[in-house]
Image (cartoon, rainbow, N blue to C red):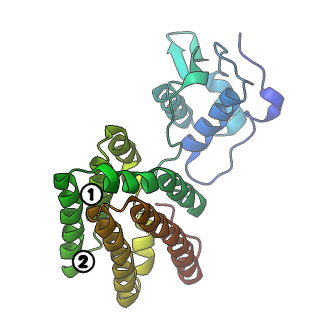
Amino acid sequence: MAIRNAGGTMLRPVAPPARLTREIAERIADEIASARLPPGAKLPTEQEMVAAMGVSRTVVREAVAALRAQGLVVTRQGAGAFVAADADRRPFQLTFDGLPSIAEVLDVMELRASVEVEAAGLAAERGSPAARRRVGAALAVIDAALDRGESAIAEDFAFHRAIAAATGNSQFANFLEYLGRFIIPRQSIRVAAHRPEGQRAYLETFQREHRAIANSIAAGDAAVAREAMRRHLVNSQVRYRRLAAEAKALTGPPLTR
């Protein structure tokens, strides 16, 4: 039996802007997370959601497909969609597609800091000579990319992955691989692109911070490595806020991708 509209919150009209599929999926996910749609409950029918939310069948179907991919709902032929029995035990995941807001960029940076500061310390403390050399080599690859006038986004990510690998704990590397494209805020690079000299200064600043991290890891100084990584990530948050504010002043609301 279909569950009633929980307090009128889920089946309210959807605002016109883009990302309707995501908005609907998140709205239903919120109902599940709050247990207003408990495990086993039947979702409103496709027709009910189309009528109440003012969207197309395609949007509703894509939202349900996204929830199914996340393990939150299951579909039964001819019966509809139901909250998965183990929906309350789904694994950790980032819940946004891309980096849609400054706040979410900063949230990821804060999450990174909690893991990468310790990774830098462990890389310095117990990284093998070969692993430490790979960190240094990754730093040199960034230098080469910057000399070519590139933004070195992929190279930056590779540097952080080399540090994670140097910990000797594969879970650090797995975590960074999971973050993947979220780890280097591409918006920051693009924000500075309207001023070539500003972009170059930005890139040289973060590379100096990278060098301090790499040098402390090479020296085996765990305390200094942790502090250098902490300083780098905190400074990155400050830079992102500033550059995003500059972009907003020049072009209006910040880009979401």
Q: Is residue 110 above or below residue 232?
A: above
Q: Tell me the crowding category of disc 2: few under 14, some 14 to 19, or many 20 or more residues within 10 angstroms, Cα based.
A: some
The type of residue carrying mark 1 is Ala
Residue 126 in the image: state x and y as whole percent.
Answer: 30, 49
Q: Tell me the crowding category of disc 1: few under 14, some 14 to 19, or many 20 or more residues within 10 angstroms, Cα based.
A: some
Q: Is residue 87 above or below residue 175?
A: above
- The disc placed on residue 126 is none
SS at badge 1: helix
How far apart are the two marked residues, 1 and 2, measured between alpha carbons?
A: 14 Å
The type of residue carrying mark 2 is Leu
- Of 143 and 96, nearer the camera is 143
Q: Where does label 1 land, which residue?
A: 158
Q: Is residue 210 left or right of residue 47?
A: left
- Of 17 and 57, nearer the camera is 17
Residue 115 in the image: state x and y as whole percent.
Answer: 46, 50
- On-image quarter of the N terminus: top right
Q: Is residue 46 above or below residue 169?
A: above
Q: Where does label 2 land, which residue?
A: 146
Q: Is residue 6 above or below residue 116?
A: above
Of pointers 1 and 2, the one earlier in the residue sequence: 2
Residue 160 in the image: state x and y as whole percent.
Answer: 33, 57
Q: Is residue 222 left or right of residue 159?
A: right
- Of 184 and 74, nearer the camera is 184
Q: Residue at x 48, y 69 (%)?
A: 231
Q: Residue at x 41, y 48 (%)?
A: 179
Q: Residue at x 45, y 28 (%)?
A: 69
SS at badge 2: helix
Report which quarter residue 27 is drawn in.
Answer: top right
Q: Residue at x 35, y 78 (%)?
A: 208
Q: Is residue 170 left or right of residue 109?
A: left
